[in-house]
């Protein structure tokens, strides 16, 4: 029989937990159970130390200095780009652009490629699963250009309706120029068939962006194998710092798009008669970048690469299966999101109780979850619910955490139902 803490043979979750100092504390008099990983993941000592080492030992601006500290900072910063390029199997380092996170990366594409290429009558397809950051930028640009944003329908299970998607692509209501979908739903954990979505979109000439915020922290991503035109993700959801992320794009598209912001670093020459822009990737990186963030994100990648990621995925999947099994025997609990493939997220409702009340009561017992619409209001409207309670897992969680969640829910139920 498997032990409560170790769910997969050969994956030592208790040893890994020692790498995360924040996990070893009490909240409201109870040992912390952190189950809000879809919002942000905790940081290992390796990441915390890398950021601290930069500020303590070689804090300086990059590219511009003529001294040793600047040289060391530049080497760390650009080395981080190399690390991230290898992490997602980019054909070249120049296709890895630093952003503040997934949200800014999507906005960059919308307000450069979108403004340059969308015309009146064009359609942009986004799924009904999407986070607001993959809806609103497209609405803003579409309104300006006279295009429209159309939702790809979602089945009751929380899976994308592929037949409906194919019908939208084939419709004569206007050319589909762009498709933007999440790799994994932050609200339900649905894993979308992005390779098929990319292939179908390319058949009609549409470009595709994949929001990878919820996937890169769970398994290895290969942008070349996916075939997408753009891929965006955030550092803080993959054990790196906040305020740093990556936009990857195909070289020909990035070279053809206009700059997103103006200022230092993104220029080649400036005069009042005209300005010429820098080469990739610097064309899109105006101003002093988040140097510490890039270095910290590279440390997170090195940490992820230090152990068997397939075993980590198996461990996380076991936790989900264990949670679903316990949910089946828990009276009054309804699981939300039953797509064939789910990663990292157990979303549910406690019958007769508002999600916010559930979250507050289990927080009093040291269990941290997220409640509400999860920045996915169109999805909640489609499902006919105000929101959910979302427990989201990472590889440092264990079966004890799942047990604690259900113990807390049992106690909360006595107050709410």
Image (cartoon, helix red, strand yellow):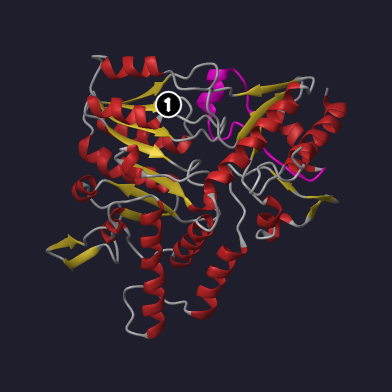
Which of these two is toward me, 46 or 73?
46
Crowding at mark 1 (Cα within 10 Å: few <14, some 14-19, many 20+): many
Which of these two is toward me, 15 or 345?
15
Where on the picture, by quarter, is residue 172?
Answer: top left
Where on the picture, by quarter, is residue 140?
Answer: top left
Where on the picture, by quarter, is residue 26?
Answer: bottom right
Q: What residue do we see at 40% from left, 78% from top?
A: 72
Q: Residue 190 location in percent, x, y?
A: 52, 29
Q: Is residue 367 magenta?
A: yes
Q: Is residue 247 magenta?
A: no
Which of these two is toward me, 325 or 10?
10
Q: Is residue 223 visible?
A: yes
Up-down: is 56 above or below 247?
below
Image-based side of 54 in relation to 404, left or right: left
Image-based side of 164 in relation to 348, left or right: left
Can you name the residue that lies furthest to the bottom here?
67
Quarter the N terminus occupies: top right
Numbered range of the magenta stretch? 365-387
Q: Residue 206 location in percent, x, y?
A: 25, 30
Q: Residue 313 location in percent, x, y?
A: 56, 42
Q: Secondary structure at mark 1?
A: strand
Q: What residue do we see at 32% from left, 59% from top?
A: 285
- Total number of numbered discs in the rendering: 1
Q: Residue 241 location in percent, x, y?
A: 53, 58
Q: What residue do we see at 32% from left, 61% from top?
A: 286
Q: Is residue 241 visible?
A: no
Which residue lies under the disc numbered 1? Answer: 127
């Amino acid at each position: 029989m498997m032990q409560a803490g170790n769910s997969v043979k050969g994956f030592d979750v208790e040893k890994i937990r020692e790498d995360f100092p924040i996990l070893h504390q009490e909240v409201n008099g109870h040992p912390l159970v952190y189950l809000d990983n879809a919002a942000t993941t905790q940081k290992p000592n390796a990441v915390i130390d890398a950021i601290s080492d930069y500020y303590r030992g070689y804090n300086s601006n990059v590219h511009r200095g003529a001294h040793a500290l600047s040289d060391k900072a530049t080497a760390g910063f650009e080395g981080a780009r190399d690390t991230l390029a290898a992490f997602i199997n980019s054909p070249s380092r120049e296709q890895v652009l630093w952003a503040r996170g997934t949200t800014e990366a999507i906005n960059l594409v919308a307000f450069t490629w979108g403004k340059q290429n969308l015309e009146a009558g064009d359609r942009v397809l986004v799924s009904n699963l999407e986070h607001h950051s993959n809806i609103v930028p497209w609405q803003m640009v579409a309104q300006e250009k006279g295009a429209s944003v159309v939702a790809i329908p979602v089945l009751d299970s929380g899976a994308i309706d592929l037949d409906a998607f194919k019908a939208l692509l084939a419709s004569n209501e206007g050319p589909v120029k762009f498709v933007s979908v999440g790799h994994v739903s932050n609200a339900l954990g649905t894993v979308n068939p992005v390779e098929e979505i990319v292939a179908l979109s390319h058949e009609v000439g549409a470009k595709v962006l994949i929001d990878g915020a919820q996937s890169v922290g769970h398994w290895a991503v290969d942008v070349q194998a996916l075939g997408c035109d753009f891929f965006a993700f955030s550092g803080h959801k993959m054990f790196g710092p906040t305020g740093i992320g990556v936009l990857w794009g195909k070289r020909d598209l990035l070279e053809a798009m206009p700059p997103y912001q103006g200022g230092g670093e993104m220029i080649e020459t400036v005069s009042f008669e005209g300005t010429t822009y820098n080469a990739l990737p610097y064309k899109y990186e105006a101003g002093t970048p988040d140097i510490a963030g890039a270095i910290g994100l590279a440390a997170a990648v090195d940490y992820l690469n230090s152990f068997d990621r397939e075993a980590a995925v198996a461990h996380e999947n076991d936790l989900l299966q264990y949670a679903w099994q316990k949910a089946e025997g828990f009276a009054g609990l309804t699981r939300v999101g039953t797509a064939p493939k789910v990663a990292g997220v157990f979303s549910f409702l406690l019958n007769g109780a508002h999600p916010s009340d559930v979250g507050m009561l289990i927080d009093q017992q040291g269990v941290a979850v997220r409640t509400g619409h999860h920045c996915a209001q169109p999805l909640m409207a489609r499902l006919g619910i105000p929101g959910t309670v979302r427990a989201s897992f990472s590889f440092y969680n264990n079966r004890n955490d799942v047990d604690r969640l259900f113990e807390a829910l049992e106690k909360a139920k006595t107050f709410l139902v």
